[in-house]
């Protein structure tokens, strides 16, 4: 069934204004079960009660779906993203323990519970977790190449996948569910019904050894060229004693394959995630959630036990909530707004719950459902909304990981108090000409003098950790003031009671339970939270599958600052991550799918969702990763670093004098003795290179943002497809 691209737009003044920062969404197609599988064509069996069973490559036009024990590989075709009935390839995954028993369905122990496509090192990989506890990984580029070769030689589809070999095959003893990777640190995390999270840390080999052809581990996916992944050996780190021994080897602890076991949960763990961005290249932080609706925060290289546990139960009555997904968010990939209603999609309702200030944004779902309500929220001319690019100012999280002090002379002790106070006033009262003015002086002067120089020298790897070391010394919100605020909030503006948040010292996390969405700006803090209750209620109120109502199908698109979250019962929410001065990090519900027009036309299939997948549209694919990870080059010396990045085999340009920006004293612990260069780890160098490397793409200059597609795959094989993008031009 085909549709012209019908964009959901409203011409009213307020709606035109909100469209400036809401992603544009249009329907591409609805491919029904009858259209895909006529009566004379057999169709695969869909597993029930699993996690996400669909994933799209970000670099290639490939869709992966899991049916029982097999992976089907599809190429969505044409502007309507048609799949049809015949996949390009069917992969029968290799199992580390082929005779391991099942948990949900003993008769089919190798049924796939979850699949994930994400970056690992410079490669994109496909991971799958099974009910028997087996976990297998494939290189996406290897699958793509095998399909191309098979197509060249002819033959009937689906092609034989015998030449596609896994790079990873392990077993975690019981039904595996959560899957996560860390791109820079080259880690794979798996959560299982044993209550244990297993992290596989691949040995890191210096890329300079690539030239002798002896390094299978860098920069490509580890062990892609290895002889047999079933014979891989891992050093087990499963006790406090073994962790202490490992810490003695830091920073040389990554010379071997490590298998670390993290314990603290006593229930099933459907999700585990890393802070998978360049601000934490060494993968210090990990979060997880269990079916008791608790979130655990872990310091990966410090302890095998969690550093914090938080419950997400709501005080108000209602159905019991279980934790299904948790996601660390990049603190800079957000929209920033001047007004709370623009950041939250409604006027947030603050209330105290269990000693915590909670900003309730449930009302935003009503505005999305009935766009006419937005007319009453029209922004006047003197409150014209100015939206930034997708990142916060560099003075919040500098690219080089240091505090910008070049234009800020070191204050004397007599000037300290006055300047800090002045900085605080500046942050609290943005001017009309610059409504988003932020001050770094507050953060800068809070650092003790003995630590200032050390902090300036350190790289991006230490910024989050170092800020967190001061945790608890200066609470952002005072509990007594919050209680007063709740009592008098109808009479006094919010800004008079809530202290303005300081520069982000941590990454926010987004948590999904049965039907609630929650954002915590600071995971180690218990004072502020944003909550949206049952945002999909209007879509699911007549559903026959309320038992499947769980927000466990989630995909994060950092480039757009968007999270797509779906309930298996059938509803989908498109969420934009935002920041506002008085609230800090928060989120805005922008779209609910399927659209009301589709519901009225009875185009929505009734079965539950088997999975969702989002990726760039064909022609907008993500480019390959960096061509080289420079080593022994100071990232602040941009000329030499960029030359090495783009010319891994060429000679470096000569310089008459070494650059001053990279100079460090011999006593600097982060500088390699005798080299004058920071002693960066491979993940740190990779993070710097990825941040700098911005290759030209064909859509640059023609479109304001990358265009993405969203596929909703239902258990009856119906596929609904959408396209979304940002039009920052208004």
Image: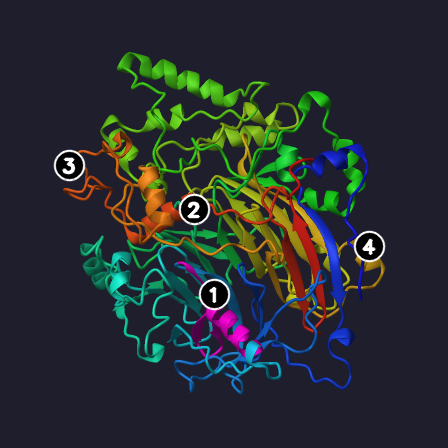
Q: How many numbered discs?
A: 4
Residue 428 location (% of width, % of height): 51, 22
Circle nearer the viewer, 1 or 4 = 4
Give the CA distance from mark 2 to mark 3: 31 Å
Nearer to us in this view, 52 or 522: 52
Residue 373, located in which quarter of the rendered image? top right
The mark that comes first in sequence, 1 or 2, is 1
Which residue is labeled 4 in the image?
597
Residue 132 location (% of width, % of height): 46, 79
Magenta span of residues: 122-151
Give the CA distance from mark 1 to mark 3: 43 Å
Which residue is labeled 1 in the image?
178
Is residue 150 located in the magenta-colored stretch of the structure? yes
Q: Report helix, strand or loop for mark 3.
A: loop
Which residue is labeled 2 in the image?
693
Q: Are marks 4 and 2 in contact (CB under 8 Å)?
A: no
The mark that comes first in sequence, 1 or 3, is 1
Residue 191, located in which quarter of the rendered image? bottom left
């Amino acid at each position: 069934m085909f549709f012209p691209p019908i964009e959901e737009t409203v011409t009213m003044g307020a709606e035109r204004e909100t469209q400036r920062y809401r992603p544009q969404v249009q329907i591409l197609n609805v491919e029904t079960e009858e259209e895909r599988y006529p009566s004379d064509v057999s169709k695969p069996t869909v597993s029930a009660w699993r996690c996400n069973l669909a994933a799209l490559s970000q670099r290639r036009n490939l869709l992966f779906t899991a049916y029982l024990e097999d992976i089907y590989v599809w190429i969505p075709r044409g502007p309507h993203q048609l799949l049809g009935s015949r996949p390009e390839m069917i992969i029968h995954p290799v199992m580390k323990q082929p005779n391991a028993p099942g948990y949900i369905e003993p008769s089919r122990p190798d049924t796939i519970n979850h699949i994930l496509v994400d970056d690992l090192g410079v490669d994109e990989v496909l991971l799958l977790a099974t009910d028997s506890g087996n976990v297998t990984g494939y290189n996406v580029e290897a699958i793509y190449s095998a399909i191309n070769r098979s197509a060249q030689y002819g033959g009937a589809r689906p092609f034989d996948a015998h030449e596609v070999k896994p790079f990873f095959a392990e077993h975690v003893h019981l039904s595996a569910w959560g899957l996560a990777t860390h791109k820079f640190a080259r880690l794979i995390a798996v959560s299982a019904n044993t209550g244990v999270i297993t992290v596989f840390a691949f040995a890191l080999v210096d890329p300079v050894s690539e030239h002798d052809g002896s390094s299978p581990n860098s920069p490509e996916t580890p062990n892609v060229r290895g002889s047999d992944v079933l014979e891989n050996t891992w050093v087990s780190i499963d006790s406090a004693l073994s962790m202490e021994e490992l810490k003695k080897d830091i920073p040389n602890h990554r010379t071997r394959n490590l298998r670390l076991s993290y314990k603290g949960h006593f229930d099933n763990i459907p999700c585990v995630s890393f802070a998978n961005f360049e601000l934490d290249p060494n993968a210090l932080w990990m979060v997880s959630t269990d079916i008791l609706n608790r979130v655990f925060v872990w310091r990966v290289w410090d302890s095998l036990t969690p550093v914090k546990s938080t419950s997400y139960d709501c005080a108000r009555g209602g159905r019991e909530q279980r934790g299904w997904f948790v996601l660390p968010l990049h603190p800079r990939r957000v929209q920033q707004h001047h007004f709370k209603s623009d950041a939250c999609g409604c006027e947030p309702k603050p209330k105290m719950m269990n000693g915590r200030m909670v900003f309730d944004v449930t009302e935003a779902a009503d505005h999305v459902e009935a766009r006419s309500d937005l007319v009453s929220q029209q922004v006047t001319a003197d409150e014209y909304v100015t939206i930034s690019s997708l990142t916060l100012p560099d003075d919040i999280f500098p690219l080089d990981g240091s505090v910008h002090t070049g234009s800020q002379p070191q204050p004397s002790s007599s000037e300290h108090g006055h300047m800090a106070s002045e900085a605080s006033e500046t942050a609290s009262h943005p001017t009309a000409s610059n409504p988003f003015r932020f001050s770094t002086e507050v953060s800068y002067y809070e650092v003790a003098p003995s630590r200032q120089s050390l902090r300036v020298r350190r790289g991006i790897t230490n910024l989050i950790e170092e800020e967190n070391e001061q945790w608890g010394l200066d609470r952002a919100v005072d509990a007594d003031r919050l209680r007063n605020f709740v009592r008098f909030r109808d009479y006094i503006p919010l800004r008079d009671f809530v202290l303005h948040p300081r520069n982000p010292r941590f990454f926010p996390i987004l948590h999904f339970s049965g039907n609630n969405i929650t954002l915590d700006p600071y995971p180690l803090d218990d004072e502020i939270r944003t909550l949206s209750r049952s945002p999909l209620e209007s879509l699911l109120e007549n559903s026959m599958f309320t038992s499947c109502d769980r927000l466990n199908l989630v995909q994060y698109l950092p480039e757009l600052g968007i999270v797509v979250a779906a309930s298996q019962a059938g509803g989908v929410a498109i969420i934009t991550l935002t920041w506002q001065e008085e609230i800090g990090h928060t989120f805005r519900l922008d779209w609910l799918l399927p659209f009301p027009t589709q519901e009225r036309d009875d185009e929505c299939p009734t079965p539950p969702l088997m999975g969702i997948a989002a990726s760039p549209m064909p022609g907008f694919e993500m480019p390959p990763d960096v061509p080289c990870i420079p080593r022994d080059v100071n990232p602040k010396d941009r000329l030499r670093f960029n030359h090495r990045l783009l010319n891994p085999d060429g000679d470096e340009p000569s310089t008459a004098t070494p650059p001053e920006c990279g100079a460090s004293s011999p006593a600097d612990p982060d500088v390699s003795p005798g080299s004058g260069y920071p002693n960066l780890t491979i993940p740190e160098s990779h993070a710097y290179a990825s941040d700098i490397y911005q290759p030209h793409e064909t859509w640059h200059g023609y479109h304001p943002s990358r265009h993405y597609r969203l596929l909703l795959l239902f258990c009856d094989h119906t596929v609904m497809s959408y396209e979304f993008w940002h039009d920052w031009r208004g």
